[in-house]
Image (cartoon, grey):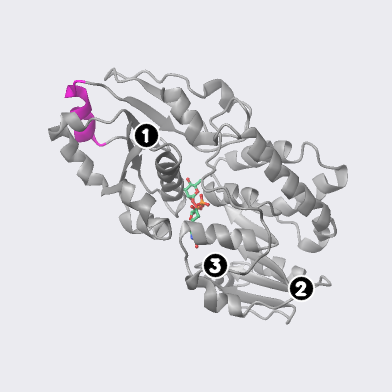
Amino acid sequence: MRWDIFCQIVDNYGDAGVCWRLARSLTSLHGQDVRIFCDDLPTLNLLASGVDPEIKRRIDIQPWEASHHNSRHPVETPDVVIEAFGCNLPERYLAGLLIAPKKPIIINLEYLSAEPWIVDFHQKASPQAHGIPKYFFFPGFQENAGGILLDPIPKEPLLTEQWIPESLETSWKLLRPNTKRISVFCYPGVPLLKWLEDLATLDEKFDILLTHGQREQLQFSSAHPTQPLALPDSIQLISIPFVSQDEYDWVLSQCDFNIVRGEDSFIRAQLAGKPLIWHIYPQEDGAHKTKLAAFLDLYLEDASQELKHAVIAAMTWAMPSEWYQSIDEWSAHSKAWRADLLENQADGGLAARLMGFVA
Ligand code: TRH
């Protein structure tokens, strides 16, 4: 089938990250013919840069405006149109669909959520005045939700350094033996410096891999506007460049603990099978708190009371000294959660469920 994915970048990298991962999953796992129309090609290309060139060649990446010309080629009408995160289709593109001999199906691909209500709305019709069939699709963890994007499934998360991506070679040389590794990819507004200072009080050495832009965030943290970064030797800060999506996946799999955010990195950290702090995208109405609680309900369903307390504390930015004593149990739990996730998504996850629904 022919798929057109529309991707409008609201902020950060997540919109492009999710659209790209969907495109590559549909192409590499299901042999689909995919075009992406995106209003920020530099961001999309940056994420996509490391992927197998054969897959990249098969995905047609186009600027948003290029979709306007589609109205002149009704023969090129896709079978499926994805409005990622409810973005509106360009009017001229929609006009082209209206005169096309064969109508596609439009999918409003929603944000990922662990909230129970999504299963009641998943795959429901969203009738439009223009008459083209449109449906909601809700990614999620539950069996009867839209699933998660799995591609590529990281290999067993063993700490192995036989292969190091070229872009990370310099940073990797700085890593110390017998030292725990933590990667950091979070939004501003959390007490990260205080968190690191507290980490330094533990009887352990830590190498902290700061993703692109994270060091600046630390320096200008509102809690410490003028304080220079003075951390003891037990904590080493290493800034890494912005890497491709595949290389970032690799980073997650090579760390003992990951701080992630948004949607795509959040899933990738789970698939890496390591403990994580999910810095959920903050929403003004506080809706993110409900979403975080819904995820924690699922994630901690089988956890001991002690682990529940520790993980909830960590995810709400309590200081590491308050929960780090549970790290071994949390590590074991993360491996089990990864296995459960893969079992629950053994049907192929989001891309396969989407294929099934459209069929
Ligand atoms: O960047 P994010 O915070 O994205 C968002 C946006 O805020 C968006 O508006 C919101 O809708 C969404 O989250 C829920 O976080 P996310 O989703 O994890 O996306 C980051 C992408 O960037 C992901 O695909 C991983 C990738 N990435 C790299 O490829 N290289 C890197 O070096 C890093 C740090 C990330």
Q: Position of residue 177 (x, y in %)?
A: 72, 77
Residue 304, by quadrant, is top right
The foreground one among 250 and 261 is: 250
Instruction: Give residue 73's quadrant in the image.
Output: top left
The disc placed on residue 82 is 1
Cα distance between the residues tagged 1 and 3: 32 Å
Vertical arrangement, residue 116 with respect to residue 261, above or below: above
Residue 86 appears at what percent x and percent y? Answer: 40, 35
Q: Nearer the viewer, residue 70 or 79?
A: 79
How many neighbours does mark 2 have within 10 angstroms: few (below 14), some (14-19), or many (20 or more)? Answer: many
Which image quarter holds the C terminus? top left
Q: Secondary structure at mark 3?
A: helix
Amino acid type for the residue under numbered disc 2: Ala
Secondary structure state at the residue bearing disc 1 = strand
Going 65% across and 70% down the picture, which residue do you hit? 208
Sequence order check, earlier mark of 2 and 3: 2
Badge 3 amino acid: Gln
Q: Do we see residue 316 in this rendering?
A: no
What's drawn in magenta, residue-wise? 90-101
**Number of other residues with Cα within 10 Å of mark 3, as a class: few under 14, some 14 to 19, many 20 or more:** some
Residue, disc 3 = 214
Do the numbered discs 1 and 3 sit on residues whose CB atoms are within 8 Å? Answer: no
Element under disc 2:
loop
Q: Is residue 320 left or right of residue 246?
A: right
Q: CA distance from mark 1 to mark 2?
A: 46 Å
Instruction: Let me know if residue 92 appears in the view.
Output: yes
**Proximity of marks 2 and 3: CB atoms separated by less than 8 Å:** no
Q: First in sequence, mark 1 or 3: give its number.
A: 1
Give residue 200's mark: 2
